[in-house]
Amino acid sequence: MGWAGNVLGWFSRDLAIDLGTATTLVYVRGKGITLSEPSVVAIEKQSNSVLAVGAEAKRMVGRTPGNIVAIRPIKDGVIADFAMTERMLKYFITKAHNRNAFVRPRTIVGVPSRITEVEQRAVRESATHAGAREVYLIEEPVAAAIGAGLPITEPSGNMVVDIGGGTTDIAVISLGGIVCSESVKVAGDRMDEAIMGYIKRRYNLLIGDHMAERVKIEVGSAYPLEEQKTMMVKGRDMISGIPRTVMVNDAEIREALEEPIHIIVNALRTALENTPPELAGDIIDRGVVITGGGSMLPGLSTRFQEETNLPIITVEDPLTSVVLGVGKVLDEIDLLKKVSLMTPERTMR
């Protein structure tokens, strides 16, 4: 492969991006997943210059001096800060290509199922300005279903519940498209907020996002555990203002998580009620596939099973099923035409 071949190789590394509220994953065609980092940007207030992106920026959340702010540009699954999303995407795209700024990849981005046309345009423009040559969008539940290996192009019903950081997307997919869907802005982040609120009410203790997330991962559950778990939680006493530590157990955190879990269960029920009878029969046979980082909460599948009486299938690696699904679509151009939203806007450069 000569010099010309190398140049073409640089330019043809297509990308699949799962642009998540909490985490962004990038899949490079021919290489697999090359990047998985928090969707966070740290900027210096006065100059508005970017200091850090991703993991490095997340470490700064809640720990920055007054002149540095850590921003999460995607809130509840949608772009809240257009300029910051663009900068973050640019960073991730060049990092995925080993800092090669010449690459103009074809890019497919996974987006929430209830995304509006205005939001679709915002994602497209962000990716275009960040250096993409062509931008395609694919709905996350469809991508998750492809990533989980479901036969979505067949005339049969496949149900996917994708619990991310900002949104829970529930969709029934048949013949490559979404037949009915339900989306709630309740997922991993809301679970963290519920834990913060509970500890504040119960113990008069203020804890940060990092601590809440750790509590959820270490002792959080949606269904009673076989063995009790406890954890030391550090925070600031609301009355004295002095740092203090309390011990919490899994039963308390389950109580804290009851409200967000109840909302997700209700959304699942609504989606099932709206499913056409023929496809409902397929779901009874095949079950409901749950995916996304939020689906890793212990006991969640048991809770869903009790509430719906349907078989619940958890995928092997819930965090990567969306990006792997988008990655599979990169290789199958016919499938891309079937499942992508609108036609790609080519950049006029």
Image: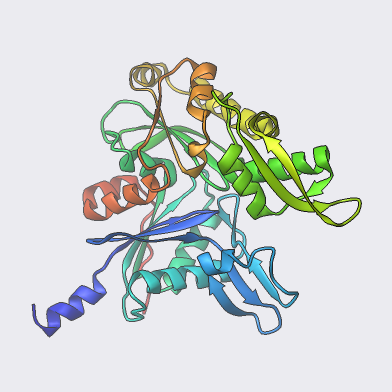
Is residue 316 positioned above or below 10 on the image?
Answer: above
Pick the front one: 337 or 55:
55
Rendered residue at 30%/25% (across/down): 156
Number of numbered discs present? 0
Is residue 130 positioned above or below 295 on the image?
Answer: below
Does the rendering let one see residue 193?
no
Instruction: Measuring from the top left, give residue 175's x and y in whole percent.
Output: 30, 34
Judge left or right: residue 53 versus residue 95: right
- For residue 220, what is the image quadrant? top right
Display colour scheme: rainbow
Does the rendering let one see residue 15?
yes
Q: Quadrant of the C terminus?
A: bottom left
Judge left or right: residue 17 versus residue 62: left
Pick the front one: 206 or 45:
206
Instruction: Measuring from the top left, give residue 184's x and y in whole percent.
Output: 59, 38
Pick the front one: 23 or 234:
234
Instruction: Measuring from the top left, give residue 320's x and y in whole percent.
Output: 38, 48
- For residue 289, what is the image quadrant? top left
Pick the front one: 121 or 43:
43
Rendered residue at 57%/41% (across/down): 218
Judge left or right: residue 8 versus residue 144: left
Is residue 6 positioned above or below 186 on the image?
Answer: below
Is residue 104 positioned above or below 202 on the image?
Answer: below
Judge left or right: residue 279 versus residue 245: left
